[in-house]
Structure formats: structure tokens, C-alpha cells
């Protein structure tokens, strides 16, 4: 959760480049949180059930983040990657996410 005082200091924006690649607001938010000196905790805080159909679901329970994910999601590393992305005009954190975890991550905005 983000406190009101922190929200007042954050400027929300999305970086879009002439190559049709974009760095979405959720990624840029991490950059501003780092600049504001906000603490960022990433882990699963609540129980949730993800239903595949009306009878089958996968239950996720609260747990701490593992060391590898904690290291790859460290605020300093993310800050550096996002700053490099803005300079290179390419979403580097998304590329690393896809390489490490195999998921699609955040989608690029294409025209």
C-alpha cells in the first residue's frame, strides 16, 4: 500500500518511444518510489484462490519471497534497469522478466 504523503510526491506517467515500445506506468511507478525513498515490499500478503473452472482452483497462501526473486526484484537493481530502459528506449526489465521467469510480463504497447 502506498501512503497519501507518498502519493502526493509521485508523478504518474508512461514512456512511449518512436519504436512503439513503452515502459508502462506500473514500471515507472517503481522508479518514482525509489526517488521518494519509499520502502517497497514484494511478497504474497493474502490468501487467494485462482479458479480454472467452477470446481478446480489453485490456492495461494501468504509466504515470503525467495532469495532469487528478492534479488531480481531489488529496488536498486530495478531502478538501474528502468533508468537504462529510458535511455535506451527499450523495456529492459520486461526482457529480463521473460528470460528469467518465462512469462509474458507486462505487454508492450504497439501501434
Image (cartoon, rainbow, N blue to C red):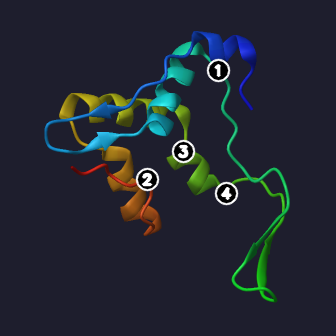
Secondary structure of residue under mark 3: loop
Q: Earlier in the sequence, mark 4 or mark 1?
A: 1
Q: Earlier in the sequence, mark 3 or mark 1?
A: 1
Q: Earlier in the sequence, mark 2 or mark 1?
A: 1
For residue 106, the mark is 2
Residue depicted at 24% across the width and 51% down the height:
110
Q: Nearer the viewer, residue 68 or 32?
A: 32
- Residue 76 is situated, as x and y percent measured from the top left of the image, at 49, 30
Query: Measured along the vertical axis of the image, is residue 97 above or below residue 31?
Result: below
Secondary structure of residue under mark 2: loop
Badge 1, how many Cα within 10 Å: few under 14, some, many 20+?
A: some
Distance CA(mark 3)–CA(mark 1) = 15 Å
Which of pointers 4 and 1 indicates the residue nearer the eye? 1
Q: Nearer the viewer, residue 31 or 5?
A: 5
Q: Which residue is mark 4?
A: 66
User: Dots 3 and 1: beta carbons under 8 Å?
Assistant: no
Distance CA(mark 4)–CA(mark 2) = 21 Å
Q: Quadrant of residue 13?
A: top left
Which of pointers 3 and 2 indicates the residue nearer the eye? 2
Q: Earlier in the sequence, mark 4 or mark 3?
A: 4
User: Dots 3 and 2: beta carbons under 8 Å?
Assistant: no
Q: Which residue is mark 1?
A: 38
Amino acid at each position: 500500500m502506498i501512503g497519501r504523503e507518498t502519493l502526493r510526491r509521485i508523478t504518474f506517467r508512461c514512456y512511449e518511444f518512436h519504436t512503439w515500445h513503452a515502459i508502462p506506468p506500473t514500471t515507472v511507478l517503481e522508479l518514482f518510489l525509489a526517488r521518494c525513498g519509499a520502502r517497497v515490499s514484494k511478497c504474497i500478503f493474502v490468501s487467494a484462490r485462482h479458479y480454472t473452472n467452477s470446481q478446480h482452483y489453485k490456492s495461494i497462501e501468504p509466504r515470503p519471497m525467495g532469495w532469487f526473486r528478492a534479488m531480481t526484484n531489488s529496488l536498486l537493481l530495478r531502478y538501474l534497469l528502468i533508468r537504462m530502459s529510458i535511455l535506451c528506449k527499450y523495456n529492459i526489465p520486461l526482457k529480463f522478466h521473460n528470460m528469467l521467469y518465462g512469462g509474458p510480463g507486462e505487454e508492450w504497447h504497439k501501434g
